[in-house]
Image (cartoon, coloured by chain):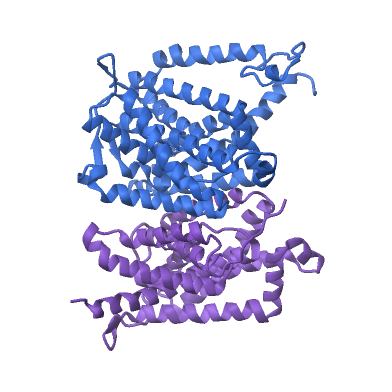
Chain colours: A purple, B blue
Amino acid sequence: MFDWQFLCLLVSNGVLLGLMYALIALGFVLVYKATDAINFAQGEFVMIAGFAVAVLIGSHGAPWWLAAAVAVAGMIAFGFGLERVVLRPLLGRPVVAVIMATIGLAAVLRGLGPLMWGAETRSLPLPISDEPVIIGPLLIAPIELVGAAVSLLFLAGFSWFFFKSRQGVAMRAVADDQQVAMAMGINVERYFALAWAMAGVVSALGGIVWGNLLGVDVHLALVGFKVFPVVILGGLDSIPGAIVGGLIVGVVENVAAGYVDPLVGGGTKDFAPYVLMIIALMFRPYGIFGKRAIERL
Amino acid sequence: MIHRECGVLHTTYAADMALFPLPIARKSVAAIGVLFLVLVPIALDQYYLSILNLIFIAIVGAIGLNILVGYTGQISVGHGAFMSVGAYAAANLAVRLGFPFWLSLPLGGLTAAAVGVVVGIPSLRIKGLYLAIATLAAQFIIEWVINHFTWISGGVQASIEVPRPSLFGHAIASQREMYFFLLLFVVLAIAAALNLMRSRIGRAFIAIRDRDIAAQIIGIDIFRYKLLAFAISSFYAGVTGVLYTYYLGIANYEQFQIGVSIDYLAMIIIGGLGSVLGSVFGAIFVTLLPIAIRWVMESFGDLLFSPAAVHNLIPNLRLILFGSLIIFFLVVEPEGLNRLWRNIRNYFRVWPFAY
């Protein structure tokens, strides 16, 4: 007999995890949307923020809200600094250069985290109980509910920002055409920095939520690899795309892991999203909501 | 280095594009040949030869990746996986069918080339970032497949022991014999790449890198040439994997994970994109970097840190230096070590005059 409860469990879990993926993917989309740059270090941003919060709570005894605030502020500063030092000199250079710079940045952060704070896995305690919430047939970890709520909140917030606020509209203009935006009197460089700072904020939140779920060590950065299937499926420059892509990836990887793992002996969770992504790249490379780029000479 | 180019006048395109554009080049290549064939193997002991061997393997891989990234402008974050394809193909052929190295090595390369072409197919529709992500996906998928199919990976811990390569019944076992074995492939790899880039194919690659739509308009079949670039590049990668496998005596997927792909990208960026000599410089630099860090930390690290901390420090320091160097070269000197070398050479070319 087909076990419906098992499937429901997998799907509900996938939906919540998917929303948490969407939160991290949002950082990626923000940067891409505004600056056309690709951040291969998104996972490392999350890791560094997670480390900062875990160390502040664990070693310095800070209350969690203070640690979170410090991490958010720190990541904003980091985003601004990064844009100024690394990304701005690379303006107008080929895509490969920007990709490689962020890969280099990822290596630096992955070495820096354990170098400063040790290689052991730290816990990131939040005042959220570990007892699963039972809703009908579903068992749900409270942190996943909180994480999903936080991501929905921020996704909604950034959608509003991009479509209604003056800065958001300016940022869309910058993304659309830098020269025209400049001619309209928009300070392009300021908006680039702002985009990286916003990515920092989102990463800090992602670091807190995911750090609580997985524990903080170098492997937290691997969450970043999940971002690529999410953004490719949803479309690189689309905030709703990040949600939909996150949901698809979350559900697919959970269901695939539930049903395929017993057959092949593990690892499907990391593998299934990439297969899905390859298929998406073949048929709809600009994603579900992405803007199709037309190239001219 | 000190020579004059006066009186060297090229009157044909063929002369201008010759492998040795100046008479002195023949002499310097001959000198380098004597150095590596005679002096180095006599002068150095096993330890230094083993480092040189690692550099040789890296050179082959770096040249291959540079053909794809530096010359054709198609990024690949999956070269580690292509290497593992070559390594496992050759290991399986050598162990199950008893193939000698001169059969399993090219076959391993060809298998990697076939896989590389399949991965490269999306490159017609997608480019830049999308291609980077697609090759990243290939890296994960190939790793997963090798890890989960015991038919490929040989079961326990996904590793296959391979016999030593043998020539005329003589097994190549010591570091010194390995040195000559690998040197042969380095020479082949360099010569093949230099000649490829002088040919019609190489010029097509460069045209695609500079502007692919424009290249298509002037009649270059970009689909064909992009796939060809992927095939050649992953053939090099496959051969690198096979060489590494023969060098270690074991094929193991852990030697070819995502970190390796990034190491090779670092080599060509630090060395210089779109330059064979740059690939060589980059391979030397990136292979020596961790050895140098280890040496420095083991010699002087105790002064500042406890022994346990030093142990933790070495791998992390390596990552940090690595990443910083990538960023540094991208921002400050995008043409890499090759450019620095050219600047030095140009300075001495007219020395002691200003110009």
* Image position of A179 with respect to B224: above or below: below
Q: Residue at x 31, y 36 (%)?
A: B89
Q: Residue at x 37, y 78 (%)?
A: A144
* Image position of B214 with respect to A193: above or below: above
Question: Is residue A115 left or right of B19 when viewed as pictured?
Answer: left
Residue A22 is situated, as x and y percent measured from the top left of the image, at 47, 71
Residue B299 is situated, as x and y percent measured from the top left of the image, at 40, 36
User: Residue A230, can we see it?
Assistant: yes
Q: Residue furthest left?
A: A1
**Looking at the rendering, in which quadrant would you find the C terminus of chain B?**
top right
Residue B206 is situated, as x and y percent measured from the top left of the image, at 63, 36
* Image position of B84 with respect to B141: above or below: above
Question: Is residue B211 left or right of B189 when viewed as pictured?
Answer: right
How many marks do you count on the picture?
A: 0
Q: Quadrant of residue A85?
A: bottom right
Q: Residue at x 29, y 21 (%)?
A: B174
Residue A269 is situated, as x and y percent measured from the top left of the image, at 33, 63
Pick whichever, B223 or B197, lies toward us.
B223
User: Residue B303, can we see it?
Assistant: no
Q: Residue at x 39, y 70 (%)?
A: A250
**Looking at the rendering, in which quadrant would you find the N terminus of chain B?**
top right
